[in-house]
Amino acid sequence: MLYIIYQIDKPGAADLRAAHREAHFKYLDEHEDILVLGGAMLAEDGATRTGSVLIINVPDRETAERFSANEPFRKAGLFERVEINRMRRGQWNPAAAPKTAEGS
């Protein structure tokens, strides 16, 4: 089952995000078998991080909740709000994805 994890950073949390960035990426690498898509949400300036979105493929909500609870950014208290919702894959068009991390 697909779950989207939508996470909004607390205001002024850039230093907290930076401090746990390496652990965050290590955690995602360790779970690459379930990670469908992940990325930081950006302010319109294209540089300021405002949150994160992760889409994972796991057997049930309990597994999604556990994955989220153990994610280093969340454990560090980076997020003001976290929403976890089951989703259904509709359209799937990887060819339309940008070739760079920031999009193009």
Image (cartoon, rainbow, N blue to C red):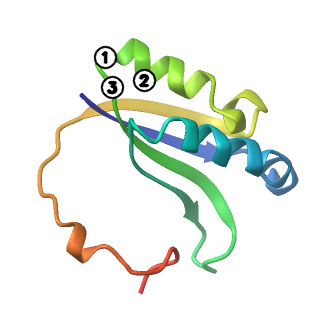
Q: Is 30 left or right of 84, judged from the image as shown?
A: right
Q: Secondary structure at mark 2?
A: helix
Q: Eyeballing the image, is 95 above or below 58?
A: below
Above or below: residue 53 compared with residue 2: below
Determine contact: label 1, label 3, CB under 8 Å.
yes
- Distance between the Cα atoms at labels 2 and 3? 6 Å
Q: Are marks 2 and 3 in contact (CB under 8 Å)?
A: yes
The one nearer the camera, 52 or 99, is: 99
Q: Which residue appears farthest toward the bottom when viewing the image? A: 104
Residue that carries the numbered disc 1 in the rendered image? 60
Name the residue beneath numbered marker 3.
58
Q: Amino acid at mark 3?
A: Val
Between the C-alphas of marks 1 and 2, the distance is 7 Å
* Circle 1: residue type: Asp
Kind of residue at disc 2: Ala
Relative to 2, does residue 6 appear above or below in the rendering? below
Name the residue: 41% across, 87% down: 104
Q: Mark 1 and mark 3: span between their CA atoms? A: 6 Å
On the image, which quarter does residue 56 sit in?
top left
What x and y, as percent, mark residue 16? 84, 47
**Can you identify the residue that label 2 sits on?**
64
Q: Are marks 1 and 2 in contact (CB under 8 Å)?
A: yes
